[in-house]
Every structure is written in C-alpha cells, then in structure tokens.
Image (cartoon, rainbow, N blue to C red):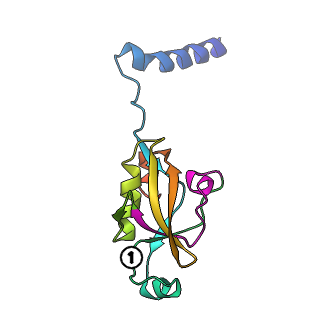
Amino acid sequence: MRRRQFINLLVAAAIWPLAAGAQPAPPSPVCGTIGVQVHPMTTAFAQSLGMTEPYGAIFGRPRPGSAAAKAGIERYDVVTAIEGVPLRSWRDFAPAIARMAPRTVVHLTTWRSRQSTQTRVIVGSANCADSATKAR
C-alpha cells in the first residue's frame, strides 16, 4: 500500500502545477557566440605585433569545433574591427557578438603575422544567461 501512495504522490506532484494553471518556464533567450574569449590589448603586445596603435582585443584559444575554430582564428590573433567598425575596447567584442542572431555571417578584421586580414565567421548560439559571464 505504501508503494501505491508514493506513486500517487509523485503523480500528484507532477500534475499539480498544470492543474493550478502554471505555465511552463519560457525557453532561455539565445545569444550569438563564436566560441572564443577575448583579452585586453596592451601597448607592449601591440608593439610586439607591429601594430601602430593598441586597440582591439586579443583572442584566446578557440574552443574546439567552435565557429572561431572553424573560421581559422588562432590564439593571439587580434580582432580590430567587426563588420568594418573599429573595435576600440576589448570589452565591446562580447556584447557585439551576443546581439547577433545565430547563423549570421560576420566579417572580422584580424591582425596576425604583422598583417591585417578579413575573417568570415558564422555566429553560433549560446544561452544568454550562461554567456553573460563569459566573453565570446
């Protein structure tokens, strides 16, 4: 008899919110991501790369399989512009990418081996709550 009461209790707990008119939780909002963290640019690092100004953001190592890895982004590449708009502060990168819809094609201007190149990246998706504490 106790087993039946326990099962009834479980069923009641499962259906009670529905009977009470509770709505299921809405899905978490989705943010854009490319799967790489960014770090602040320093004057010394910019000079070591042959850059004339210390602006942009330094890429960390891309997560394996991420949009950044698929696009060929490497650790210590420097992103200097997003869609042709100069990136003056490293803090601007994550919010700019997060605002983009998944599967958006974004063109990043990057600096590697003392030259500027254009990198095409297809934005991935992440849970906005998770990505609020991480750079993209």
Q: Position of residue 51 (x, y in %)?
A: 45, 82
Residue at the image point whose x is 39% and y is 39% from the top: 29
Residue tagged 1: 55
* Left/right of residue 110 with respect to residue 73 in the rendered view: left
Visible in this render: residue 93?
yes
Residue found 56% across the figure and 51% down from its top = 67
- In the image, residue 116 sits, relative to residue 84, either above or below, namely below
Q: Is residue 68 magenta?
A: yes
Query: Which residue is at the front of the view, 19 or 125?
Result: 125
Which quadrant would residue 52 be assigned to in this image? bottom left
Q: Is the residue 29 above or below the residue 50 in the image?
A: above
User: What amino acid is found at the position of numbered circle 1 in the picture?
Assistant: Tyr
In percent of width and height, residue 89 lies at 35, 71
- Which quadrant holds the N terminus? top right
Is residue 134 visible in the rendered image? The answer is no
State the extent of the magenta-drawn residues as a range.
65-81
Q: Is residue 94 magenta?
A: no
Q: SS class of the residue under badge 1?
A: loop
> What residue is shown at x 54% (from left), y 55% (from top)?
35
